[in-house]
Amino acid sequence: MTCTDCEHHVTAALEQAGAEQFSADFRRGLARFTWPESAGEAALRAAVARAGYTPGRLRAESPGTAAALGGEADYDLLVLGAGSAAFAAAIRGRDAGYRVALAEAGTLGGTCVNVGCVPSKALLAAGAAYWAAGHPRFAGITTSAGPVDLAALVAQKDDLVDALRQEKYAGLVDAYGFDVLPGHAAFTGPDTVEVDGRAIRPGAVLIATGASPAAPPIPGLSGAGYLTSTTALDLKAVPRRLAVIGANAVGLELGQFFLHLGSAVIFVDVADRIAPFEEPEVSQALAGVLAGQGATIHAPAQVLAVERDGDMRRIRAAIGGAEIVIDADEVLVATGRAPNSAGLGLQAAGVATDGRGARTRRVRRPRGSALPDTPPAGPAGPQRPHRHRPRPGRRRPDRGTGRGGLPAAARRCRLVRAGPVPGRLRLPGLAPRLGPHRPQHGPSPGAPSRRPLTGPFRPARAGHGHGSRRPPAR
């Protein structure tokens, strides 16, 4: 159902099949009605199908009636978190006709729209424009860059974040018909979750709580104070000198942003080059660009300690056996992220985690339990490198959706970046080669057969974007 006319068509079909006291809600994708004994389920489904709609799962809502997925569940699926992975799972669950709720203790939208891709890329674009204005490239054309009002730029970024959070997240809650439960969520037992003091018994739980910036145990760092990828986005003044500890993607992009605005930026990384997870040629090219724009790079370098002297931070680092001192007004730490799993009560649910707090194994519940499985989505899951399909024999059984059941929403495809350097590429059916491109049809001799990648989401119809599909009527 996509409009009020759809509601009329569905209720008319139900009335024709003998239903009573009927109503339909296209935003939630459901129809409610009284089911007299004289009306059969097959007749109800056939009437809805003849009207041009796909009937979903039929669920009784009378008092005392057992809910699906393991007894009297309050929700068929409870998602811990309300970011992009959580919303994807909620939409998939609603498409399948399940009752879904998201539990969120913070701000709706998670990392990407609030403190990740959206705000950082907005600031990066502004920084690049400012740098280009101050460094004209064409003869006969003069441009200049005036003073920077970082507070005004951050306010503009906040307005963009608010608008996209409403459009891409908050606006989809009523459209798809799932609930958002504000408050901290934690397991109180294998089959129960408490959200802001309310006990909830879900049919299945998906952990999608995301991750937060993590800092290494450098002596004096906490006392000296430092920026993270989150707090750096809210600075109101451009620091004169900025030291960046960690020169991978996040550290490099935020460091270059402040470099473009006029900061003297120093990158420090323990690896032997910046962007250590990329090809060496990529690291070399990035280092050349940053150095050409005025940045200083120390790699490899071991940070020994950080001290504070008034408003200045002093970093002691070891480089090639010698110790140097780096003075900075601000220190940005971009050395990685850690899963937001503390306080979730995972032990009460029987979920095993590693030292980072990430879940290390799938927990199967005894037969008949209301919580058959507790899969994670996003950074809370196990970080296995370059796995792009499930291992044989580990695929979840079908639970009626045709795509492996509700927890299938946690499946994801890991993308692999493969450089052109021979000896670095080791994928079945692919042989790296130099010289003219020669298309190779089919796998190499002796390579194992490969099934096409599949996922839990249906492609959007032509002309429709994210959020355009509605759950089926039921």
Image (cartoon, helix red, strand yellow):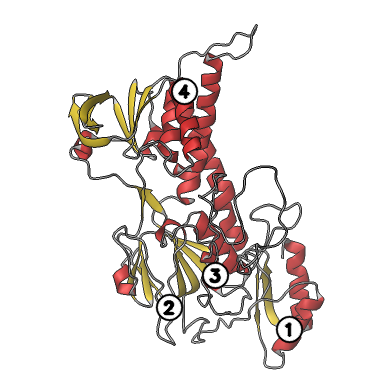
Q: Disc 4 and disc 1: Cα gap in Å?
A: 64 Å
- Residue at 56%, 58% in the rendered image: 427
Mark 1 / mark 3, whichever is N-terminal: 1
Q: Quadrant of residue 329?
A: top left
Q: Disc 2 and disc 4: Cα gap in Å?
A: 51 Å
Binning the other alpha carbons within 10 Å of mark 1 as few (below 14), some (14 to 19) or many (20 upward) gives many
Whether tag 4 and tag 3 are in contact, CB under 8 A, the answer is: no
**Residue 259: x %, y % from top left:** 43, 24
* The N terminus - image quarter: bottom right
Q: Disc 2 and disc 1: Cα gap in Å?
A: 31 Å
Mark 2 / mark 4, whichever is N-terminal: 4
Compared with residue 55, is residue 237 higher up or lower down, i.e. above or below?
above
Question: Label 4 amino acid?
Answer: His
For disc 3, the marked residue is 408
Compared with residue 24, is residue 342 higher up or lower down, i.e. above or below?
above
Mark 4 / mark 1, whichever is N-terminal: 1
Binning the other alpha carbons within 10 Å of mark 2 as few (below 14), some (14 to 19) or many (20 upward) gives many
Which label is found at residue 44? 1
**Residue 418: x %, y % from top left:** 55, 49
Judging from the image, what secondary structure is the residue with disc 1 in?
helix
Question: Label 3 amino acid?
Answer: Ala
Whether tag 2 and tag 3 are in contact, CB under 8 A, the answer is: no
Which label is found at residue 341? none
Mark 2 / mark 1, whichever is N-terminal: 1
In the image, taking residue 287 as reference, residue 220 lies left or right, namely: left
Which label is found at residue 260? 4
**Residue 43: x %, y % from top left:** 75, 87
Q: Quadrant of residue 367?
A: bottom left
Judging from the image, what secondary structure is the residue with disc 3 in?
helix
> Mark 2 against mark 3, which lies toward the viewer?
3
Binning the other alpha carbons within 10 Å of mark 4 as few (below 14), some (14 to 19) or many (20 upward) gives many
Judging from the image, what secondary structure is the residue with disc 2 in?
loop
